[in-house]
């Protein structure tokens, strides 16, 4: 874990008087020394994102003691449940976003201001915020590892599909972004996409999207030259 993350955990625990060490010791006593690395990592990850609105020190302790999956059977059940649920939730939100942007994304008629408003609306903006509030996000953080890009690049080639899935599951909650901010981010992305999608250039009566259609048209009009010789051939002999 990075030094900045460790300082953040220490600061939160100090300011809120979170009993992180007591929770770790209690969980190790219950599940054994072999689980210590998972326990210490999970409790620290929860402490990093815990806020006053999530509960006091007693609520933190009660949650951690009740929500740690200390045996393989429980951990597998937790993983399988999250895998199934998030595949469904994210899939439906993807379908909704596709339908909300249909008039903007497809060339099927005029785009009215209300079409742009629909396209900018993200029905999933509140989801991760809700998952922190109802503690599901904390269940994931308590039981699965947060990883850095450096860790994934260094060790990812040797990870199993399950290890990658666990890393991706936890990564979902590597930031705690308020729903209002997520919605503003969605509006900005929609505005940028709309700018690209409607920035057209007309060539010989054809409407070309300046981003890639114009590139393809230029490529089509370029004379087809004989491929140049390979570099190895130019410098050989």
Image (tube, rainbow, N blue to C red):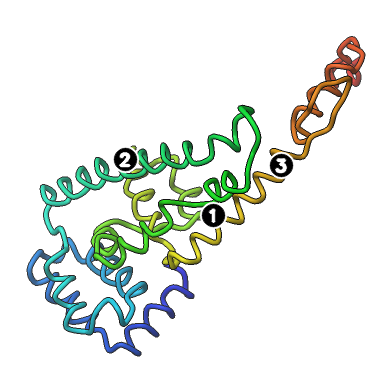
Q: Which residue is mark 3?
A: 196
Residue at position x 41%, y 37% from top? Answer: 95
Q: Are marks 1 and 3 in contact (CB under 8 Å)?
A: no
Q: In the structure shown, which secondary structural element does the residue marked by tag 3 occupy?
A: helix
Quadrant housing the N terminus: bottom left
Q: Residues within 10 Å of mark 3 (few under 14, many from 20)?
A: some
Q: Which residue is mark 1?
A: 186
In the displayed structure image, the side of residue 5 where residue 45 appears, left or right: left
Q: Are marks 1 and 2 in contact (CB under 8 Å)?
A: no
Q: Earlier in the sequence, mark 1 or mark 2?
A: 2
What percent of the width, then of the height, locates residue 66?
A: 11, 67
Name the residue furthest left.
30
Distance in Å between CA atoms under marks 2 and 3: 30 Å
**Front residue (pair 165, 152):** 165
What percent of the width, then of the height, locates residue 176?
A: 42, 66
Q: Quadrant of residue 17?
A: bottom left
- Above or below residue 229? Residue 15 is below
Distance in Å between CA atoms under marks 1 and 3: 16 Å
What percent of the width, then of the height, locates residue 229?
A: 87, 14
Q: Are marks 2 and 3 in contact (CB under 8 Å)?
A: no
Q: Which residue is mark 2?
A: 87
**Front residue (pair 31, 178):** 178
Residue at position x 36%, y 56% from top? Answer: 127
Closer to viewer: mark 1 or mark 2: 1
Q: Quadrant of residue 81?
A: top left
Label at residue 167? none
Q: Residues within 10 Å of mark 1 (few under 14, many from 20)?
A: some
In the displayed structure image, the side of residue 220 where residue 179 appears, left or right: left
Residue at position x 29%, y 56% from top? Answer: 144
Q: Quadrant of residue 197?
A: top right
- Above or below residue 226? Residue 172 is below
What percent of the width, then of the height, locates residue 9?
A: 37, 78
């Amino acid at each position: 874990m990075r030094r900045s993350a460790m300082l953040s955990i220490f600061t939160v625990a100090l300011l809120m008087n979170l009993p992180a060490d007591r929770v770790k010791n209690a969980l190790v006593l219950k599940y054994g020394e072999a689980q210590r690395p998972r326990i210490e990592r999970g409790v620290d990850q929860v402490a990093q994102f815990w806020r006053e609105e999530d509960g006091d020190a007693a609520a933190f302790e009660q949650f951690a003691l009740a929500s740690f999956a200390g045996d393989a059977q429980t951990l597998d059940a937790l993983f399988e449940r999250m895998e199934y649920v998030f595949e469904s939730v994210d899939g439906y939100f993807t379908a909704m976003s596709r339908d909300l942007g249909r008039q903007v994304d497809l060339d099927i008629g005029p785009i009215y201001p209300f079409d742009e408003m629909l396209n900018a609306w993200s029905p999933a903006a509140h989801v991760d915020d809700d998952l922190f509030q109802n503690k599901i996000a904390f269940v994931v953080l308590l039981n699965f590892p947060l990883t850095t890009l450096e860790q994934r690049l260094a060790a990812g080639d040797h990870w199993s599909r399950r290890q990658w899935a666990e890393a991706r599951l936890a990564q979902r909650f590597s930031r705690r972004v308020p729903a209002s901010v997520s919605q503003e981010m969605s509006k900005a992305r929609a505005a940028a996409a709309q700018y690209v999608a409607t920035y057209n250039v007309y060539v010989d009566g054809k409407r070309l999207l300046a981003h890639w259609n114009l590139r393809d048209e230029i490529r089509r009009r370029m004379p087809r030259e004989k491929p140049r010789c390979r570099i190895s051939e130019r410098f050989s002999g």
